[in-house]
Amino acid sequence: MNPTPSTDFPLYDPRTEHDACGIGFIVNVNGEKSHGIIEQGIEILVNLTHRGACGCDPETGDGAGVSIQIPHLFFAEECLKLGFALPAEGEYGVGMVFLPVEPQPRFQCEGILDRVVQEEGLSVLGWRDTPVESDAIGRTARASQPYIEQVFVRAAAGMDREELDRTLYIIRKRAEAEIAASAIHEKHFFYIPSMSSRIIVYKGLLLAPQIARFYGDLSDARATSALCLVHQRFSTNTFPSWQLAHPFRYLCHNGEINTIRGNANWMHARQSVLRSALFGENIDCLFPIIQPNVSDSAALDNVVELLLLGGRSLPHVMAMLIPEAWDRDSAMHPDKRAFYEYHASLMEPWDGPAAVAFTDGRVIGATLDRNGLRPARYLITNDGVLIMASETGVLNVDPRTVRFKGSLEPGKMLLVDLTEQRIIPDEELKGRLSARHPYGTWILENQIRLEALPDPPRTFGFSPQDIIRRQRVFGFTDEEIRMIIAPMASGGEEPVGSMGKDTPPACLSDRPQPLFNYFRQLFAQVTNPPIDSIRESQVMSLTSYIGTERNILDESPVNCHTLKLQDPILTNRDLEKLRRVSQGDFLATMLPMLFRVDGGEKELTRALDGLCRRASLAIQSGYSIIILSDRGFDEEYAPIPSLLALAAVHNHLVREKTRTQVALVVESGEPREVMHFCLLIGYGASAVNPYLAMESIEHLVGLGVLPDGLDVEKALGNYKKAATKGLLKTMSKMGISTLQSYRGAQVFEALGLGKDVIERYFTGTASRVGGVGLDVIAQEAKLKHEFGFREVSEYEAELDLGGEYTFRMDGERHLITPLTIPKLHQAVRQADAQSFREFTRLVDDQSQGLLNFRGLVDFKRGTRGVPIEEVEPATRIVTRFVTGAMSYGSISKEAHETLAIAMNRIGGKSNTGEGGEDEDRFAPDPNGDSRRSAIKQIASGRFGVSAHYLVNADELQIKIAQGAKPGEGGQLPGHKVDVFIAKTRNATPGVGLISPPPHHDIYSIEDLAQLIYDLKCVNPQARISVKLVAEHGVGTVAAGVAKARADSILISGDSGGTGASPLSSIRHAGIPWEIGLAETQQVLVMNDLRSRVRLQTDGKLQTGRDVVIAALLGAEEFGFATTPLLSLGCVMMRKCHMNTCPVGIATQDPRLRAKFTGTPDHVIAFFFFLAEEVRALMAQLGFRTMDEMIGRVDLLQPREGIDHWKARHIDLSAVLHAPAVPLRFGRRCLVAQDHGLGGSLDHELVSRSADAIRSGTPVNIHLPIRNVDRAVGAMLSGEIARKRGSAGLPDDTIRVLFTGSAGQSFGAFLARGVTLSLEGDANDYVGKGLSGGKLIVYPPELSTSPREEWTVVGNVALYGAIAGQAFFRGKAGERFAVRNSGATAVVEGVGDHGCEYMTNGVIVVLGKTGKNFAAGMSGGLAYVFDETGDFASLLCNRDMVSVDPLEPDDDATVRRLVQSHAVLTRSPRAAAMLDRWQEVVSKFVKVFPHDYRRILSERAATAHGAAKRREEAAIG
Amino acid sequence: MGKPTGFLEYRRETSPRRPVEERINDWRHVWRDLAEPDVRTQAARCMDCGVPFCHHGCPLNNVIPHWNELVYRGRWRDAARILHATNNFPEFTGSVCPAPCETSCVLGINEPPVSIKAVEQTIVEHAFTNGWLIPEWPSQRTGKRVAVIGSGPSGLAAAQQLNRLGHHVTVYEKNDRIGGLLRYGIPDFKLEKRIIDRRTDLLRSEGIVFTTNAHVGVQISVHGLLKSYHAMLLCGGAESPRDIDVPGRELSGIHFAVDFLSQQNRRVAGLPLASEREILATGKRVVILGGGDTGADCLGTAHRQKAVSVLQMEILPRPPAERAASTPWPMWPLQLRTESSHEEGGVREWSVSTTRFEGGPDGSVKKLHAVHVGPPPDFAQVEGSAFSIDVDLVLIAVGFSGPRKSGLLDELGVALDARGHVSTDENYMTSQPGVFAAGDMRRGQSLVVWAIAEGRMAALGVDRYLKAAAMISQVQSPMRTH
């Protein structure tokens, strides 16, 4: 059982748990049952062990399980022994039942189940104790092991098998509900893994190798099945949970459903309209459809079960819940599009990375999400066995018997139908589904499109006379208009800012805040990837369908009687259309969201109650659209905050289960920026009409403020574009692709809202520090309303000036002020300790003046101090200080190197940031200084991340997210990429560089474990750290990261961030480090994982008090970026993104860089002053060493006597909580992680290559390889880089030939001089970070089948490759050569998103590519053999590239490479091509990035000019 | 922001001063206004800092980056609005303020700062020229009456703010014209008096009552006034000039600078002088004691009066030509300043201390004896450095010692601080309930910009007081008196 957020673990929320895993199945397509299938299934499981994890107890896994067909003959024999006979197969069902261990409660549960079976007209044949071997499993698993039985249930006479399964489902649901509601002791043990006439699930808190021993049934030779579905779990927690192991009843899942909260809510809401002839009256027994408090995968399984037993086929259900990206796919067959669109109007997708394998005993298959973010490889043998798994090579299959090897593509389904005894191809399968009904006609006849509605007779116009009043009432500030609205309207882009956030959260602000500001966006980190909504826009969709939702169990035309919206931002005209709609069922009504402003909280509550009541009435009266409007406010009535009104109605209707009968549309003056739209939609709005923001734009156009030539229409269009782009980006940060699933998904947390408000109006939203109630919210509305109804004087600003983004004396308070900056400058420049004290006093006073959460705590009095002389010296303390990750590129060379020198002098650490590092800095300078950054960052762009870079580090930091813009990528425009930056980033000067939002080798936690392993292989001495950003659930993510064997975890606060970011991200994503750090410490300690990792935190740390509070909350190390920059002369211009830094720090402009005056001494002075302050506080608190202080949260207490109107509601007790755990659970890092490098195949390679590395003597090695051999070549490359630098060895010095299936990251960071050949195939991440080596992969020569179309390498090959060559005879998976910055490769086919973000290098594709080829590709060249001629029109993303015919130079290049390919891989295809080259070459196209072409032609012009000048000079 | 790269593209320009030979012959402003396009270019140099030190360095917290952007974009009217939101009289500060904003401008760290003052002045001139500055009556009257004593910048600012808050305000001025030191302290060539008149006309139209020739505490009884008003705000300035105590001080021809300057202002205005004797530099050898702004004003005035020679002496050492290391950015820099008057002639001497005056037979000063001294705080005499110079007129411009005590202050009996200024609480209320003080009278001799700031803040204090009093009792007599 999972703990719930409780007083025991107040910051831990089990809803934030994640899991990821390895999945697989084996099936005999002919339906022949054998025990061998089960054995082989378990072997698959064992070979996926590295994709799972174990917690503090190495013998206890996170869970594993198998699902097989009911072994009828075996059970028949066993049951006879127990004294009862089984009827024929199909006439009975088996329930696998977890029960309480204590006999009494167990009997009670059994009794209830017995009775329910009878009541449903079936009979219990008997119970069987499932034989288990408890010794086989770990201590922790044993402690929570349930009593496991099987119940055999006989069908009623004449019952067909479908009806039997349906009845078993009802029985299970009824028994679950009854037992859950009972007072039975230990009832939490009760759980039914499966209950079916066809399949049975064996699962538990096991490690894969334990399962066969634990469950004796599985190793009994009499047990047979034609299929075996397996799952190995990697969970972020270590709380024992037998139930959360997969497979569930019908599926197992690798990935994560990001929209789970919305999906579950909607599912709950639509229960009221569920009807089915199949279930009849019984349908009520099934509620709740989704069991409370289950994982996302379990919830998905619950819904699959309902839809399946409700009459749809399993593939139909899967296609409905996890649809392909159909919305923007013009190439898709119209019938299939209609199928998807029909189902989209029925139900929102379950969105998020997913590889789902499923079976109901009749079919078995797997499907991938639309993004293809999880791997799924399969092979088919000549004798009809199909093996599918997250990895290839999980079973040793004789290559001679292999008929085909493939990989599952995004959105596609692989299905084996045991009745038909064949594999049904995706196309046929979807074709069949699409032909079930005339979906297209249904849509045509029933669907209404907003564009097609008649124009309204009139709309609200722009009324300039009282616009100021209205802007005031809604709290618009002048700053918002200038810095948010105007830029959106003029540029169609979200505005950008820099230097993070140093203002108080809304709940501490003195100023009235929009309610929106009390929320923070959640974002994906580690456990699922954010999406690139720009470069991968084809998977994104803003379309939504509104209207009364009907019975999803029914399949009729009326289900698509919906109103289709292209996007959710409505103009006034759009809104009027909706207001007047009267087609079919559509009828709209308006409810005012206003309250009597002088009545405060009472009136606000009353108004909200009234609003909810009226919404219910409107539904009863048959309205299908409710427009919540605040247009009618006046002197007496103020607008209710739109989010509050909307969320109140939404949650009220969800509770009332009428929510799906009506669409909520918000017509409000309040929303204006991206975050506002996100919140309104995230809490359930179908559409938003931001009328005042739009009028403000008309006003600006009238004032002539916007750029010339921008008329109102264009400006509004731009605004809408910026808003929808921002909306897509915010969705994609969480890994959500469709607006439909985002709506109501509530992917936010509240910061500073009280319990009552949350429970009542924002049900289910996390709010961990309490906060304000309706009284304060009403007061804030009142203040704005009063301001609005005051006369506007000629002698004052029309609007409040704001002061959020730039400092204003009367505006929002800031932590960094005109007073503090000069004090710090004075202190470090003059070595003036007094000034430093004044600086920190100012900062601390500001904090305590309610600027941040650390300002709300005090040190506990009454502790005995120690003399300061006994406290460890400052020289020791400063080694715990690190500077933040700021790339060379974001800051100048001078600033970057100064920081490095300073940190190296004091034994702290500086960080490269994500821009690589010039290798000339790796060796010390003549004066003894070192410009080498101790921390080398590995970010999603992988700029300059080579083996040589990696070995020159003391710490390797994987940046998952950054405080200023978690979940987002970045972009360095071409004009900023000068020669030097290009050199360190392995790029072409002038060619733009894009950092993708996700690491393309981290889509889930087990991927992170793999990257950690890769990096550790290259540089075993370096500590691996993982940088996370504080948000709700960061603690559970950190637990997963600790289990993925990171050595160190950084929890970044929301306030930090020096680089350029969208302003909405700076302000609205992430939470303060105080909460994130406390959560992480608590979760790690309670899981006993804390002792394995070091914790670091950062986020505007400036004073000794800050550092000590961070240490007490659990941090061992402390990061600083803003303050060191201030020490170097930064004056908080906040113009880093504009390249105009006037003090030469955040700029590459040589004129400005010349103005840089910072020195290492300034930085050192800051850190030593700081350390001395820390020492003084340590002495007061009685600590002699920092180690003693870490995690001593008991020495902090909430500050007393806070009477601020908002802050007094904040309750920090959860943050200051010390979890009650045994003392042996460490509170700081005490032991090293076991990285398991001992088993690496590379040890052999290294030892056999010793001579080669030393003296360059060539060596040839032959070895077999398996999928468990991961990161092969990485350790060897590290050795070479360490000894030979970036130059490596001469080509082909070390040649290794492998046979078999290579594990993940084959040839990662492979150094120059090494050639790895592989006969067989390889998994994901082949050649990631390739650093000059050569890779050759080809299918086994022994195979007799044609191997042309085989998949030989997995997803994300050559990610971030820097140099080297690769030849792959066969197809590669998705995202081939993503972010390639220099490798040359030949491949015979690639999946979707090939050459994404590529900046350099050459790729030749001799066959088909997938979709979205060359997205974000700014440099390098790709040549594609376009046999069918549809590459340019259908497959290539031409936003940044053109598709051209080959020129003579190209011809030569391609031919040379194809020749090499033919020689090295013996490719028949290449040979055939060379035979008729002239014919073939005409079908090649060249993918040429615009940026790259421009640079090449500029270079040519320069060269031409120079030549001409030389000529002229010669003539002259 | 206006133009992100403006500061890299444009050089600093300020309002050009007219040629010395031209301006020395008249009393009009020494500068010529910068052309509008040039002002917009100057505004484009503003970097719209994340932390605008100018805005913080300005005692009024003028939202400088904001109006710089508006000016750059040609939105003069909006700029005037934002400017007036923090500054009642930008034309005064635009003319005479030494502009601490410019010395704290971030661009000033390593480049000449933004010409904030010129921009400010241009904005307000635009506003007057275009008739945007119209009298604005409060939307409702509170019925409370406030007396403001003194019509210098602090009194005027307070009066306007109080009037806007709905109170009835009467300003008492002992002189015949409104303006205090602006009127009779600052020479016309730095602030033409029409500038004051057009503003006070506006104030009058807003309903503020001005009573001139009304010396409270002398001609008018304070207690009488107290009975008629709900609150009183003292803005009488720090009028007592600091004197020097050396032998021969009693000789004729030795005057306080302020007397010299105010006489000239009256002459320019065509007003009769007071009964005192005329102080004129014409044809004289003039020595000015004091190297500050007032000294510089005397210098310019003396030249315009056609003095034979002018020597300005300062006891402090000559400041460095560039910002001294002891006063790093964004502090007010210790640095040699060259005012317009210094360009017009005269000699400056530093580290000089007067030891004695020597008179002629007519009792008028003829010689000044002085020595060179070392740096503060000792000002040790440099041995053998004594010298003397011939002189006909000596002007003492070594600052002010505080408000005049006799009359008003004595009668009210308000508590004074250690330096002799009126002491107040954080609401600007003196030890007498209902009596407030602001400006130089409270703060000591300071800048016009500070006076305006003081007046604004005091008005808020008065308003708070009146509101609180209104809530306690509506019936009690306006104010308790002792």
Image (tube, helix red, strand yellow):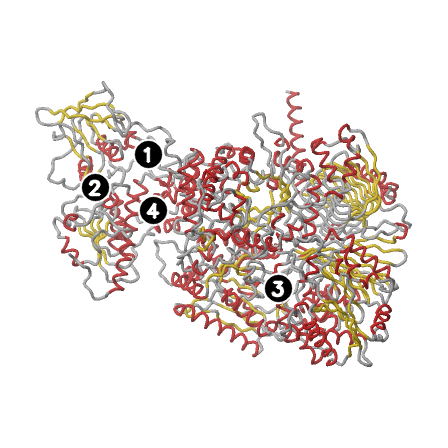
Q: Residue at x 9, y 27 (%)?
A: B363
Q: Quadrant of the N terminus of chain A?
A: bottom right
C-alpha distance separating marks 4 and 3: 52 Å
Disc 4 on helix, strand or loop? loop
Residue A108: percent from left, percent from top: 69, 75
Q: Mark 2 or mark 4: which is in front? A: 2
The residue identified by callout 1 is B17
Q: Nearer the viewer, mark 3 or mark 1?
A: 3
**Label 3 in the same subunit as label 2:** no
The residue that mark 4 highlights is B60
Q: Which residue is mark 3?
A: A261
A342 or B121, nearer to the observer:
A342
Q: Chain of mark 1?
A: B
Q: Indicate which label's residue lies in the foreground, 3 or 2.
A: 3
Q: Name the one closer to the observer, A240 or A758.
A: A240
Q: CA distance from mark 3 to mark 1?
A: 71 Å
Judge if badges 2 and 1 mark residues of a common chain: yes
The answer to whether the residue labelled 3 contacts the one labelled 1, judged by CB atoms less than 8 Å apart, is no
Determine whether label 4 and label 1 are within 8 Å by CB: no
**Which residue lies under the disc numbered 2?**
B402
User: x, y (%) of residue A743?
Assistant: 60, 64
**Observer-nearest residue: B281 or A1376?**
A1376
Q: Are marks 2 and 4 in contact (CB under 8 Å)?
A: no
